[in-house]
Amino acid sequence: MGGQANRAGGTRRVGPQRTTRGGGITKARPNLRTDRDGDVSMGAPAGGPKPPSGPSGRGNRGRGTAGATRGSRQSSRLAQNLNKYIADGTPHGPKSHYNNNKTTLKILGLKNSKAATNPDGGVKSLLEFLERKADKEKKVVLGRGVLDGDYVWVKANKDDLPSILHLNGYTYAGAPITIEETTEPFPNPASKVSRDAADTRQKLLAVLAKRYNPAQKLLDLSALGTDDILGSLGTFGSQSLAEKSFKALMHLAGAEYRTAEEKKEAIQAVSLANNEIQDVDQVFTLAYSLPQLRRLDLSGNKIEHLSKLSKWKHEFRYLEELHLASNPLTTQPNWASEITQWYPSLQILDGSQVRTPQQAAENLKLMTPQPLPQLPSNLRDGDLNVGSAFLRSFFQKFDYERHAVVTEYYDSESSFCLTAIPAPGRELPWKAYLKYSRNIMKLGTRTPALVQRLFTGVNFIGEVFRALPATRHPTLDQPELWLIDCHTFPNGADPLGQGGSAMGLIINVHGQFEEADASENLYGTRTFSRNFVLGPSKPGAVHPYRVVSDQLTLHDWKPQAAIAEPTPLTNTVVAIPAAPVVPVVPVAPPVPVALGQIGLDDATKAQMVAELSRRTGMTGEYSLLCLEGMANWNFDLALQSFEAQKANLPPTAFATTP
Amino acid sequence: MSRTDDTNARCCADAANKFVTWYYQQLNEGKPIAQAYVNKNETLMKVGHPPAEICINGQMVATPEDLDTLWAQQRSAPLATTDKTHVHYDVHCFDAVVINKDYRFACPQNLIDIHGPNDGVRMMMTVTVSGDVYFGVSKNWKTNDDFATKQHFNDVFILVPNWEVIGKQNGKFGKKYLVSSHTYRAF
């Protein structure tokens, strides 16, 4: 891939080296935020204007003064860094410098002070107090304080440590404060759940654990109002609180499982009986959390009308059993038939069977959109079977003689690109492919990779073919493993580049191959789609046609389910099933030439023999010999072999003079 | 690869990106896609451009309007309780390459004079799209996997220039490229 890399390098723009001088517009970095008088105290040469002196205003804690001072601070930082480098003999990266120069302090006593009632708990005013009192000579800047329990945590410069620890035991806002240095990790308030919340969570989990019946896969959330634990939490004190608690319960129940599939398996039934539910809106979350629920008990609630249940009308498509007994709703006319209509899989309503399992399955099918039927390969590649002959030869050579396939079928204008869609949980890794993957959706339309990963010309294509893992495609004699659609199209590229146009052939192939990645010692099956565009080749080429474009997509569809009805690949327009809705084009009569060796029946063979006879003028017997021999029922090869052997054939071979 | 080829690759990717974004959004919203096919362009059809070849799961479809009907049929279910669209296409990847950079069919002479073969305008291209199609999706199907069936789909289009839009001084409106071939498989 050296050539490719060089080519890529040629288009890459390298920006000018960024240099930092003095101050200018360079953004102040946190690691460099040291004391503001550094250049003076450290004795570095004064490079910039004199830094401002005097304390900053009260509201400017930790921020310094605005832009005007930037230049001086920058120069003092440079001086500091230079000095440190000379002293230690080692350069400091920004990170290590930051870590080496800071220390953590724990301050106790704020809780007892008058400032504890401030909106922020008094942290800001405490830190301002410490900054003000620490050193009369020098400005001390503390980091952002974090209040965690009784302590305030703050970071400070090591240089300032003595002057800050000097304040240990001072009285702040009526309470003595204790300051100590610590090596404990700085608390991260964002990741902390308050003790109350953690406690509530534990209690709710206990409720769920107590109410889950693994044998029946049932989550029994009936009569939640009488639950001791929930009662102690006061969650059913008001309706809004009860709804929130239910949401929390649902969330926790779902969070226990890693995938939706696991959850679906583990919780198949839910009971919400005797919960005084008036409208399912109150417990709507259930439909979000457990959409594939199979049994639901709503008995003993206060649902008065179907409208109170209508929020769940389009949910629970797999619901098989529903209980609504002891709800006012059940006294209304036709409620049962209506409910039965709402839930396609419903089989048991209040203990009585409303559908058989077969009826339910059928009903569900009619209620959800279904994939279009899958018809076998559709080859419309003309009389000469260019498409099928090409594929047969191409994949054979791609597997065993990749270098030959490139020189035979590709030329200087052919292009190749591949797209890999890695999916989790696959046996085979994608390492070998991802660096070439040209997924415009991921790359965007403005990246150099778009051009770099489009391989044009024999050399580049040859290189990338060599770099890809070895493959073994099944033969085309196994039509159940292939889906091929192809057709000719007009106005393709003129091979001579003179502004003309030529017929092209577009072939779309779906299949699978065995892969052997020798470098990684990995073997397995991979599925792919490959789209070829063929066009006439330039004069002097091996074949009369060439690959104009070759797009390979690697993905993970399941080949077993791919082709329901394996049908031999034949060069015909498929028979159209009686589809009432869609008018289809008139079907052209099947071209009576079939592919070699691809599950041919006797009728097709007879047709091939007849066709060869017609074209060559040979007798049926000789035509059969020709097709059976070297050509192995490949019509093109048979024709070629006839042309080659024509002179040697006895006159008896011909029915008429050819 | 020369810089001129860069232009074609980028313009092709741009056109494909616009097309793919539009096409699958229309499908997901249950809107028609027939206007993207050459059949709807009278000028091209008058000068003898063949109708678009549309092959869906191995079945030939005569016109783009029939294709719209077919997609509507796919979205519907006989006993569905809502009329909401319940089929969702989730595109994972697409790729596009130029297969004829000097496309001249029905091209006005002035456009041939203005745009050379490397200007990224007179391009015939193929676009391949892959992804998943979900049947029977509910409102929040993405978060809780609530759908009935999932298939993998692969679409291949050939796009050709729409001279009427490309030739416009202000070519902002309308589709610059139209579908002249469409092959779809879902499995």
Image (cartoon, coloured by chain):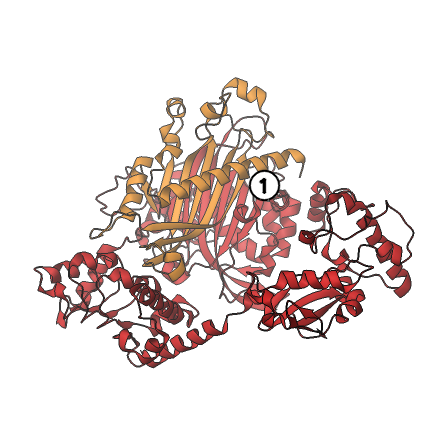
Locate residue B11, reporting x and y percent: 56, 35
**Residue located 40% across and 27% down the image:** B49
**Residue located 69% across and 55% down the image:** A61
**A553 over A587 or under it: above or below:** below
Q: Chain of mark 1?
A: A
Residue type at mark 1: give it.
Ser
Locate residue A592, reporting x and y percent: 34, 44
Disc 1 crowd, CA 10 A, few/some/many (<14, 14-19, 20+)? many
Farthest-out residue, front: A174
Which hue is chain A drawn in?
red
SS under mark 1 = loop
Locate residue B55, reporting x and y percent: 36, 43
- Of B72 and A491, the residue lying toward us: B72
Read off the residue under disc 1. Answer: A414
Q: How many marks?
A: 1
Which hue is chain B drawn in?
orange
- Of A521 and A263, the residue lying toward us: A263
Q: Quadrant of the C terminus of chain A?
A: top left
Horizontal side, residue A340 vs residue A50: left or right: left
Horizontal side, residue A473 vs residue A283: left or right: right
- Quadrant in the picture for residue A585: top left
- Of A599 and A243, the residue lying toward us: A243
Locate residue B108, reporting x and y percent: 49, 19
- Quadrant in the picture for residue B140: bottom left
- Quadrant in the picture for residue A107: bottom right
In this view of the protein, can residue A593 be seen by the observer?
Answer: no
